[in-house]
Image (cartoon, grey):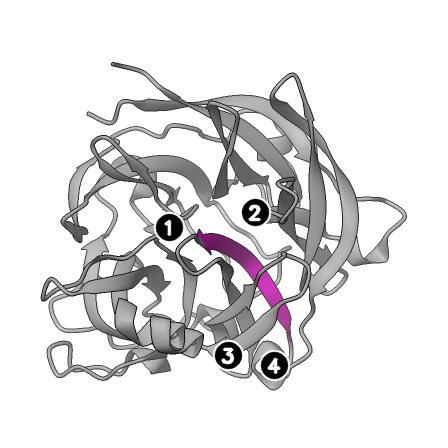
Amino acid sequence: MIPYRLTRLGILMAPDPKDPLEAEGVLNPATGHTPDGRLHLLPRVVAAGNVSRVGLAEVVVEDGVPVGVDRRGLVLEPDLSWERGVNHGGVEDPRVTYLDRLGVHVMTYVAFGPLGPRIAVAVSRDLRSWQRLGPVLFGHEAEWGVDFNLYPNKDALFFPEPVPGPDGEPCYAMLHRPMWHADWLGVGDALVPPAGIDERPGIWISYVTEAAVDGDLRALTVLRSHRCVAVGEFTFESTKIGGGPPPIRVPEGWLLIHHGVTGDVASGFDPTAPSSAVYCAGAMLLDPDDPAKVLDRTAEPLLQPQTAAEQVGTVANVVFPTAIAAIGPRQFVFYGMADARIGVAELERTVA
């Protein structure tokens, strides 16, 4: 049993109709605290043509509840070669993890470049100035018989502290979702997945040693020891699943809020392409001694598209969680609504 629930509180951020950079939506934010302790969103802001940037917006809190935002500008734009393709470009869907022992925020984001969607990493100490570390490289391992660098990848996020690696050595671990198809080209051609692996996109974990990162933060872009954590198991995740916010430590282990998808997902990057997909939020508990192991997971979604803002937008029927933040004793999940707005829900424990 997953002893947690999500209770929606409403829309937190919507596009500014006067800003052309937000013409196609604000969505899928990361969160973090600036050095003065103020909570901020780092939303994906989308201009015409589905070109994405990462913004910064301070969260307005009233009576301990987030109720709105004050925009603070942009912090990341698709400026470099790995972020710009022939027909598309963008820096998309950031997730931010604060590594307390190193005093640094780590952003994983989707760089939509020449080879389609790839994972890239940037770091910051203040949320405003970001140093790109570059695209993620996956070490070659004979066990899977494939080069993970040849596959598109999304939904990457780091754990906030070192966890045991496959051999027990303390490691920083990243969850991610390689995809065994070429839908980013708009053709839907199947690629060859690792032998014995479900062809549906699922959640994987890869590692880099704590010692390597302590020596050089750029080590966060070179990952090894890849393991499949989970693929879709229940009805609401029958098409594919992917990680949401960075995991948080709870008494039962690591709580991972994830998204599950049913229906047919539109090919390519055209947000107007037909799609029958429905995106919902679920949860998993990962073993603290082996975070590649799922201890339990929700058979039903914690949150599904039910309001007009979640059902109608750039892409219909999307609840897409990407961030968790504490305000006082309460936890809040921030999520994309129909790829157009940002919603907030309270994460509550249901049993003692």
Q: What is the spatial separation of the Cα atoms under label 2 and label 3, in whole angstroms? A: 21 Å
- Badge 1 crowding class, 10 Å Cα cut-off, few under 14, some 14 to 19, many 20 or more, is many
**Is 311 contained in the magenta span?**
no
Query: Which of label 2 and label 3 is nearer to you?
Result: 2
Q: Is residue 216 above or below residue 312?
A: below
Question: In the rendered image of this protein, does residue 254 appear above or below residue 11?
Answer: below
**What residue did someone put label 3 on?**
134
Q: Closer to the observer: label 1 or label 4?
A: 1
Question: As drawn, is 172 to the left or to the right of 133?
Answer: left
Residue 288 x %, y %: 18, 45
Q: Is residue 87 visible?
A: yes
Element under disc 4: loop
Q: Residue 49 location, x and y as percent? A: 73, 65
Identify the residue position indicated by label 4 in the image: 85
In the picture, the disc for residue 243 is: 1
* Magenta highlight range: 88-98
288 sits to left or right of 35:
left
Camera-side residue: 111 or 98? Answer: 98
Report the residue marked by disc 2: 32
